[in-house]
Image (cartoon, rainbow, N blue to C red):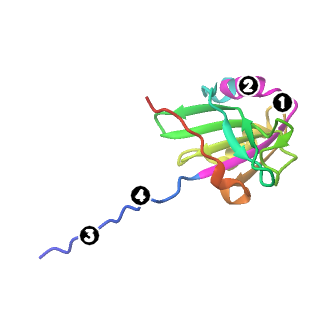
Amino acid sequence: MKKVLKIRIDESEEELLEGIGISSSYSDYRLAWTLNDFFHWRLEFHETPLEIPLKKTKDVVKYHYYHFWDELEKMQLILIKNRQGGKPLLEDYPQFDFVLFFKNNFSLDLNQMLDLLRGLECVFAAYRCNKDDFSIASLLNFEYSYE
């Protein structure tokens, strides 16, 4: 009798979320356009903002972002300006002007991506970070319609 191999699929497994902090003097739409042009992405302004409650007052700050769903790789890219509404999204990293999030990235080498970003004229600095580095990691829920 053959031995049966059982594979357990854990549906509660968290999605992989990594980020690159970017320092740039460009505006959000201009940086999105530059990244689209250089990497052949299609980052688009997302109409529904990310809503983050403030720790002390529980007021909600809305953060607008640019989004790209790569159908081939089943990966999402999110470009978000760190400081909006007078509050930084990532208080742990106030030096970042933007954060480029990679959700479910299994194909891009982020170390190579860092080198490419640092080579762009508009980028002063770029540093890799992951979801565990952010105190608000549980609130980073970027919704996207896959239609």
The answer to whether the residues at label 2 and label 4 have Cβ atoms under 8 Å apart is no
| Residue at the disc numbered 4 | 11
Identity, as a three-letter code, of the amino acid under mark 1: Cys
Residue 64 location (% of width, % of height): 71, 32
| Residue at the disc numbered 3 | 5
Q: Is residue 139 left or right of residue 88?
A: left
The one nearer the camera, 76 or 64, is 64
Identity, as a three-letter code, of the amino acid under mark 4: Glu
Residue 78 position by quadrant: top right
Neighbor class of circle 4 (other Cα within 10 Å; few <14, some 14-19, many 20+) is few
Asked if residue 69 is among those painted magenta in the image, a careful observer would answer no
Identity, as a three-letter code, of the amino acid under mark 3: Leu
First in sequence: mark 1 vs mark 4: 4
| Residue at the disc numbered 1 | 122
Name the secondary structure under disc 3: loop
Neighbor class of circle 3 (other Cα within 10 Å; few <14, some 14-19, many 20+) is few
Marks 2 and 4, how far apart at CA: 36 Å
Name the secondary structure under disc 4: loop
| Residue at the disc numbered 2 | 34
Q: Is residue 119 left or right of residue 14?
A: right
Q: Which residues are magenta?
A: 17-36
First in sequence: mark 1 vs mark 2: 2
Identity, as a three-letter code, of the amino acid under mark 2: Thr
